[in-house]
Image (tube, rainbow, N blue to C red):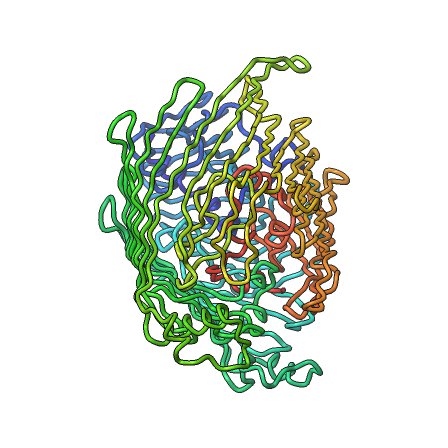
């Protein structure tokens, strides 16, 4: 009785209809939902497979046989009547009814009495169903349905279908329990076309409880997994800086491998902004272009009336000029070993990042960089040819503070074992530096190495020899500037007095260079023992390590400073052969590092209960190589460096870093952090950090579930540091307070956020509210993004994986306005 089964694909259109409006990137939590579905599974139906591709499922069904069963079969040869427990099945599909009549001559059918349908995606019950298979028309009356994968459920007075086209009359959709409708979408009529992949809702209303909150007379939406041109959810909010803020994304599906999004935005206190994004993808690469533009920003004009406005600052944007940014990120793969990458960015002015960002991280950077290059990597080598360009993003700084542009830079790294006992390698780099204020120059740095790794099961000794040669080619302007600086330092000439030509000539050198050998010895021993603590078996390790470094002194005052600065002293610095980040300075050294580490590993799962390290450098000679303004490193002992992490339980994590300088008997750095994981995804973070003469901060954040439905969130980020030189005062850096309410199908988050919005320390206050209709979408600001940035562990996965880019904004991050309402 195969013809009657043409009815079965029909109810699938319901599953493709209203719930296709959902666009949630993360799985919803249904923990608070009733166990029983609105339409429970039918016991007599075959077990449905996991939901998959709908088109593939339909194609598989077409190849499977159909079976029809019933308590009795009557009628005539042309009019068949199945009565009592009629069951039709094909693959994962099941259709049950009390009675089924089929007219073979007219090719029509009528089913009534407890109509039941189920497949991998949907279950429904109805009063009756009828259709004409010759005309491919069908009608189902008084339908109630349950989506299997999305928990969506609802009903319709009638469903009419003709081929791929159909209509749902007086339909409803919600993910809430039918007895507790927290929200519901109702529509007078929904027309769908499964071939085109579109649906049109007429007279659609979203209700919270019994209150209608949104009415849409006409709404066109996709009903399948394909991308379609249309409106995305808007972002609406209010803040002191922007006023009423509305951003309406418009998605453009241009082709299967590229698309675009337009983002018109209106800010009542500032004006109109247009944003756009273009993405493309092809076999060997991908890319993304973003940008925004405002013809006029009222914030700039209003700022001119402030008392502390500096009209003389050339970095302040002109009120009549447009403002915007442009960025491009892309890559192309040439072969298995070679690829090209680019990360380009342009800002209209130096205050753009401050005025359009809402993150403390973005304010910490005074410049942004654009990079493009070709990169290669193999088993023992890596190489690249690239270019870097810097742009000012801090209006309080000047162009002189920008790093040198590297136009271009080529490098090659090599490290290959020749045998079990010999490894050779090296580093080579050639760079052309350019700077509008300081002049141009080139640098070649070559550092070949050879090491002799000796090791056993519990020990290792690795002596390494290196030879570093660095030479420069400077233009006349940079050579002159360097010579004047050296002459002033050598003869003690004040900055307000001229330097004679003879004194300049003494230090003038357009081709300075430096060469020196570097030797090191790295050795360590590994001890371990098994132990038992409170019934758990652990492996405890003890790992002493010794690192000796020897490098002779070479006079380097005549070398320019292109991209070199001292490393922050830390545990990792104990084992480097240079305390500077770049080759413009190579430290002279005669020093020995002694360090000790220990770990406590739970044997059943490898969980690290304890890790602790302590180390110190013993300097046998004074280090004479320094950067301008840097204090000389004297003979003696470095600060003690201690790093430790301890997990008393699987929920508690405590960490600390500490540096104590015995020479001056002072604390150079102290950092303490603790995290407690509460039940129901709650978390509490406490951090205190202090670095001498630089910062002192405390950070407290939490997500505390009060009940399964209610939770409170907050952050208090405070600076205690007082800088007399810059008049920096202690105070709040960021404060967040909010409440979350969750139910089976509806969640509401409300936040108040106050944070430092510029380098002068001015504060901004924002209020954010978001309604999450689970299975449909959300309305309001992206509060989850704000909380994820403010509270580490708001998403538990962030504690174990690399945090997403929206948590810590990088200097080359193009998301200058990550939230609609800063």
Q: Residue 729, percent across and down?
A: 74, 64
Relative placement, left or right, of 535 versus 586 is: right
Of residues 645 and 613, the one nearer the viewer is 613
Please identify the quarter of the rendering in which residue 207 is found.
bottom right
- Furthest toward the right, the residue is 706
Regarding residue 611, the answer to whether it shows in the image is yes
Regarding residue 156, the answer to whether it shows in the image is no
Relative placement, left or right, of 342 versus 244 is: left
Q: Residue 444, percent across and down?
A: 30, 57
Q: Is residue 708 above or below residue 263?
A: above
Residue drawn at point x = 40 percent, y = 26 percent: 461
Q: Is residue 42 above or below residue 476?
A: above
Residue drawn at point x = 44 percent, y = 74 percent: 484
Q: Is residue 122 above or below residue 194?
A: above
Of residues 321 and 459, the one nearer the viewer is 459
Of residues 554 and 72, the one nearer the viewer is 554
Residue drawn at point x = 64 percent, y = 72 percent: 242
Q: Residue 85, percent across and down?
A: 50, 24
Relative placement, left or right, of 463 versus 618 is: left
Q: Is residue 683 above or below residue 167?
A: above
Q: Residue 472, percent across and down?
A: 32, 62
């Amino acid at each position: 009785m195969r013809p009657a089964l043409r009815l079965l694909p029909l109810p699938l259109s319901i599953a493709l209809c209203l719930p296709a409006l959902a666009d949630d990137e993360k799985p919803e939590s249904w923990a608070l939902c009733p166990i029983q579905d609105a339409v429970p599974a039918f016991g007599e139906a075959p077990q449905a497979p996991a939901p998959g591709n709908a088109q593939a499922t339909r194609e598989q069904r077409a190849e499977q046989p159909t079976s029809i069963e019933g308590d009795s079969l009557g009628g005539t040869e042309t009019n068949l009547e199945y009565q009592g427990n009629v069951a039709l099945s094909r693959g994962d599909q099941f259709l049950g009814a009390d009675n089924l009549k089929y007219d073979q001559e007219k090719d029509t059918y009528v089913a009534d009495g407890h109509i039941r349908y189920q497949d991998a995606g949907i279950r429904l019950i109805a009063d009756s169903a009828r259709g004409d298979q010759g005309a491919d028309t069908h009608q189902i009356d008084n339908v109630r349905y349950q989506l299997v994968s999305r928990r969506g459920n609802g009903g319709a007075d009638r469903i009419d279908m003709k081929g791929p086209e159909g209509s749902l009359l007086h339909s409803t959709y919600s993910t809430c329990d039918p007895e507790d409708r927290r929200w519901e979408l109702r529509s007078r009529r929904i027309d769908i076309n499964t071939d085109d992949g579109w649906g049109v809702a007429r007279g659609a209303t979203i209700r919270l409880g019994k209150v209608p909150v949104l009415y849409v007379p006409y709404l066109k939406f996709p009903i399948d997994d394909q991308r379609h041109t249309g409106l995305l959810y808007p972002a609406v909010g209010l803040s002191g800086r922007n006023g009423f803020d509305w951003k309406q994304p418009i998605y453009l599906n241009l082709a299967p491998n590229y698309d675009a999004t337009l983002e018109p935005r209106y800010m009542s206190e500032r004006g109109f902004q247009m944003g756009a994004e273009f993405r493309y993808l092809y076999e060997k690469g991908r890319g993304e272009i973003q940008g925004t533009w405002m013809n006029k920003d009222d914030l700039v004009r209003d700022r001119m009336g402030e008392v502390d406005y500096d009209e003389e600052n050339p970095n302040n944007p002109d009120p009549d000029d447009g403002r915007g940014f442009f960025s491009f990120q892309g890559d192309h793969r040439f072969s298995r070993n070679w690829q090209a990458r680019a990360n380009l960015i342009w800002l209209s002015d130096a205050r753009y990042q401050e005025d359009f960002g809402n993150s403390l991280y973005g304010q910490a950077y005074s410049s942004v960089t654009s990079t493009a290059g070709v990169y290669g990597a193999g088993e023992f080598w890596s190489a690249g040819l690239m270019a870097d360009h810097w742009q000012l993003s801090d209006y309080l700084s000047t162009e002189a503070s920008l790093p040198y542009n590297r136009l271009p830079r080529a490098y090659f790294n090599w490290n290959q074992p020749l045998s079990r006992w010999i490894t050779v390698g090296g580093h080579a780099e050639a760079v052309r530096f350019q700077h509008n204020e300081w002049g141009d120059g080139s640098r070649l740095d070559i550092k070949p190495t050879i090491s002799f790794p000796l090791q056993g099961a519990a020990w290792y000794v690795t002596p390494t020899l290196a030879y570093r040669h660095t030479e420069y080619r400077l233009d006349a302007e940079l050579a002159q500037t360097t010579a004047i600086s050296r002459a002033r330092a050598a003869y003690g000439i004040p900055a307000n007095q001229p330097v004679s030509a003879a004194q300049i000539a003494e230090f003038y050198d357009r081709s300075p260079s430096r060469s020196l050998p570097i030797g090191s010895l790295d050795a360590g021993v590994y001890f371990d023992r098994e132990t038992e603590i409170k019934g758990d078996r652990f492996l405890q390790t003890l790992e002493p390590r010794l690192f000796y470094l020897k490098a002779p002194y070479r006079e380097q005052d005549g070398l320019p400073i292109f991209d070199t600065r001292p490393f922050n002293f830390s545990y990792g610095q104990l084992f480097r052969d240079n305390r500077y980040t770049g080759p413009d300075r190579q430290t002279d050294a005669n020093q020995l590092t002694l360090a000790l580490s220990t770990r406590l590993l739970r044997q059943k799962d490898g969980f690290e209960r304890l890790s602790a390290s302590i180390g110190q450098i013993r300097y046998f000679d004074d280090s004479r190589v320094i950067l301008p303004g840097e204090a000389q490193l004297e003979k003696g002992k470095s600060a003690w460096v201690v790093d430790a992490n301890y997990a008393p339980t699987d929920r508690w994590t405590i960490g600390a870093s500490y540096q104590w300088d015995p020479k001056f008997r002072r604390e150079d750095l102290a950092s303490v952090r603790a995290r407690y994981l509460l039940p129901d995804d709650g978390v509490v973070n406490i951090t205190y950090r202090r670095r001498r003469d630089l910062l002192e901060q405390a950070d407290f954040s939490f997500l505390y579930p009060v009940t399964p439905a209610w939770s409170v969130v907050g952050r208090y980020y405070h600076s205690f540091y007082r800088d007399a030189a810059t008049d920096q005062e202690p105070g709040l850096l960021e404060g967040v307070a909010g409440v979350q309410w969750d139910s089976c199908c509806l969640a509401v988050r409300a936040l108040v956020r106050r944070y430092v919005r510029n380098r002068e320390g001015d504060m901004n206050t924002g209020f954010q509210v978001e309604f999450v209709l689970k299975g449909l979408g959300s309305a309001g600001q992206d509060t989850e993004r704000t909380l994820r940035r403010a509270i580490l562990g708001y998403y538990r996965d962030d504690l174990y994986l690399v945090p997403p880019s929206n948590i810590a904004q990088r200097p080359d991050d193009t998301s200058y306005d990550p939230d609609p309402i800063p």
